[in-house]
Amino acid sequence: MTWHVAQDDLRAYGRGDLAPPMLWSADTHLMACARCRAVLAEVSDPAPLDEGWARLDAELDAPRQGFLESAFVRLGVADHTARLLAATPVLRLSWLGAVIAVLLMTVVVTNSAEAPGTPALFLALAPLLPLAGVALSYGPALDPTYEMAVVSPMHGFRLLMIRTVPVLAVALALNGLATLALPSYGLRALAWLLPALALTATGLALTPRLGPVLAPALVGGTWVAVLVVAREMTDGTLAPYTVAGQGVAAVVAVVAAGFFYLRRDRFDSVSAHVPFAGFPGGGAA
């Protein structure tokens, strides 16, 4: 190889000032010429090169926005909030698919009953789905991004709300769509709404004390026990779905929501962040 890039041109190349067509010739030559690459390293200012590599590393290391995160950003949600929302386990397709499958099977079973009356199976199951979704959206036992969320510079109560509100909205929306598939039951099929709000609010209110696993588990177990006892003591009527039962559910929802809000600072305490696996006070200092 008899031709080499002149030092002045190499300096301009290193600064990014070399113009075509010399730029194209220098690019092609440098790929094949070790000597010119060595000279380029000697005559170039290392600072712009280091800055360029730093920018490249930052670009390569920057996490790519997924579909859900991009959708939240387009809706005006802040980048950091959108990332926390998108990382919520129960907003993933696997959870949503499981919920839809459960609701579809419940609707099919309810509609195929030989003596349709009150949609007992659907009304028993529907309030548990929002509670389960909220339970899976926050806590060290079930959330794979829990550690990153906890160290984020954000109030624990706000973090919980960021996770809870969209999960609750999605669960209620799916339940509402399933309700539309039960037209023969009329407004009775909507009776799950107040119990669902009551169960979810109660589970959240108990979380600082019992932890994000035990609290919803106890609330869900109590709900099932109430339904079983009520069904055994009556002619099959589900007590929470009577007029009195709906009134009680509304009162419980309001009281639990108020208690949850009053205890919001407890979500920044150690016992709210690290209680495990369901034992009261576990991990508390």
Image: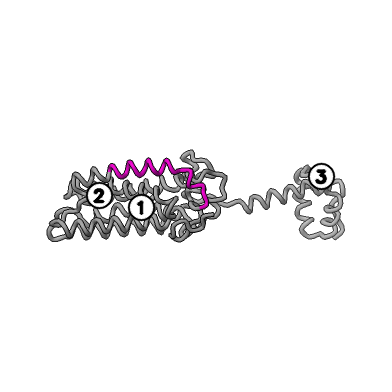
Q: Secondary structure at mark 3?
A: helix
In the image, residue 42 above or below residue 77: below
Distance of label 2 from label 3 (alpha carbons): 70 Å
Q: Dot 1 corresponds to which residue?
A: 131
The answer to which of marks 3 and 1 sits earlier in the sequence is: 3
Q: Amino acid at mark 2?
A: Thr
Q: Is residue 126 left or right of residue 152?
A: left
Callout 3 amino acid:
Ala
Lateral position of residue 167 relative to residue 155, left or right: left
Report the residue marked by disc 2. Answer: 179
Q: Residues within 10 Å of mark 2 (few under 14, many from 20)?
A: many
Numbered label attached to residue 254: none
- In the rendered image, which residue does mark 3 sit on? 12
The answer to whether the residue labelled 2 contacts the one labelled 3, judged by CB atoms less than 8 Å apart, is no
Please state, as top left, top right, bottom left or bottom right, where the C terminus lies in the image: bottom right
Q: Position of residue 22 (x, y in %)?
A: 78, 47
Q: Residue at x 63, y 53 (%)?
A: 60
The segment highlighted magenta reads 250-270
* Residue 260, magenta (yes or no): yes
